[in-house]
Image (spheres, rainbow, N blue to C red):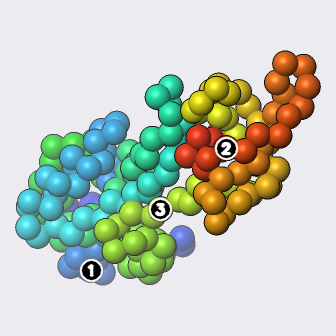
Amino acid sequence: MSELSFVQEPGRTLTDGDVPAVAWFCLRSQPKHEHIAAEHLRRMGDVEVFNPRMRFTRQTRFGPVEITESMFPNYLFARFDWQAALARVHYAPGVSGIVHFGSKWPIVPDRAIEEVRAELESDGIRNVPSQLTAGDEVNVVEGAFHGLRAVVSHVLPGKQRVLVLMDFLGRQIMVDAGLNSVVREAT
């Protein structure tokens, strides 16, 4: 393994003698298997795993659904001793590979991991607010106007309702709708 060199930050290359005993690396997971890779890596015991996720509301044909996904699709981070655990980590179930560029293996700075962690809740998830504001384009997902597009005119937070403006039967009408019956249109 003496051929391996490590890049810690742009313009700086570390050689085997300079490599920290334990460092953060970026891992590529198999598609939609970030959580599986993370769990298998955690079970190794000597590998610290960071798989930041986000929770948001997505419109489905059944109405709004709360979704939790990886913040970096197909990627996660692991902190381990590269000399002792590189092969075990690389071939762990759910892991497609460890990000590297030829014989250079980038090290993710501790500071970068801490900055992302600061944006997350204690469970490692960032809740993306689905708050609506005047002017937002929405889809109606419940009730008589299901499937129609509208524009939020006013938000009535105390009542958990919004007033939306929509085209219906050739004219514009104002409709009072519950917050759960509309979903912000994907941009």
Kind of residue sitting beneath label 2: Ala
Sequence order check, earlier mark of 2 and 1: 1
From the viewer's perspective, is residue 176 above or below residue 155? above
Please identify, in this view, whether the residue under mark 2 or under mark 1 is nearer the observer. 2
Dot 3 or dot 1, earlier in sequence:
1
Residue drawn at the location 22% of the way across and 43% of the way down? 94
What is the secondary structure assignment of the residue under circle 1? loop
Residue in the foreground of this view, choosing between 50 and 161: 161
Q: Position of residue 87 (x, y in %)?
A: 14, 53
Q: Secondary structure at mark 2?
A: strand
- Residue under the image location 84 percent in, 18 percent down: 169
Front-most of residues 182 and 41: 182
Q: Which amino acid type is shown beneath numbered disc 1?
A: Pro
On the image, the x and y values in percent for residue 55 come to 44, 54
Mark 3 lies on a secondary structure that is: strand
Mark 2 / mark 3, whichever is N-terminal? 3
Q: Circle 1 is placed at which residue position?
A: 20
Residue carrying label 3: 127
> On the picture, is 49 further left or further right than 28?
left
Separation of residues labelled 2 and 1 (CA atoms): 57 Å
Q: How many marks?
A: 3
Question: What residue type is disc 3 on?
Answer: Asn
- On the question of residue 102 being in view, the answer is no
Q: Which mark is residue 177?
A: 2
